[in-house]
Image (cartoon, rainbow, N blue to C red):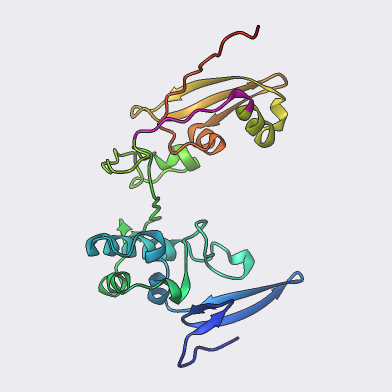
Amino acid sequence: MILPGETLLSWNAHHYRGGFIIAAKNSRVTLINYLLLDDYLKGVVPREVMADWPLAVLKAQAIAARTFAIASLKRHAADGFDLCPSDHCQVYGGADAEKPNSDLAVTATSGEVMTYRGRIISALYHSSSGGFTLDAADVWNQGAPYLKPVLDWDQNSPYNQWTKSLQWEDLQGLTARSYPALGTLRQILPLAYGPNGVLLKISLRGDLAESTINGEQFRSLAGLPSAKVQIAMVYGPEPL
């Protein structure tokens, strides 16, 4: 264990508040940064949003990030720590990421979290919804009364209205890697849409098998900004 000192600790040319724990497991060494929650958030907020955005936005992000962190403690318990520094948890940049405005937002909201019926919520957030959020039950098969689909009014996002084209051969390659039991993909068939136009279920039919996946799985497979999508097949001219 390396205890906090009068100056920031550094590793790999980056600086961090708090202290370090060096943990060894299965021939692997992990450097763990332990610190106060608000010090952690000072390294998160400016990595998740722009630090020059309005202070009200930064405060909202600070509350969301604090809530998410508390709800996600022990997410990496098997690895010996609570949260990772990537977007699997929250992007954390240490003390080098800190900015005056985002620091102010963290300090001004210290202790504030979001709750539902007295319990801390799972405060999930994202950079863009693709125009419409999804019901949590349609993404993770486990719903929450506060995670329901809503229209995203961020009209400035380039992902609110979008088009993406995929060659059939590329889609076949993607399904071959993710769903090899299908064999060669022959057909995709949307099966169900939500009332908001979000794809809920789609059938992937191959020459060996057929699989039904949810819209979020297809979104991830095809690299789409959102599962709020209409699928159109465009056929080229017949070869000579």
The percent coordinates of residue 86 (x first, y second) are: 52, 60
Task: Report the residue that reaches farthest toward the bottom.
Answer: 6
The percent coordinates of residue 216 (x first, y second) are: 49, 37
Q: Is residue 165 magenta?
A: yes
Q: Could you tell whether 61 is left or right of 44 in the image? A: left
Q: Which residue range is magenta in the image?
A: 161-169
Q: Nearer the viewer, residue 200 or 141?
A: 200
What residue lies at 39% left-to-right and 33% top-to-bottom?
A: 162
The percent coordinates of residue 81 (x first, y second) are: 57, 70
What residue lies at 52% left-to-right and 25% top-to-bottom?
A: 202
Q: Could you tell whether 138 is left or right of 28 in the image? A: left
What residue lies at 39% left-to-right and 50% top-to-bottom?
A: 127
What residue lies at 42% left-to-right and 24% top-to-bottom?
A: 230
Q: Could you tell whether 143 is left or right of 50 in the image? A: right
Task: Report the residue that reaches farthest toward the front.
Answer: 240
The percent coordinates of residue 159 (x first, y second) are: 38, 39
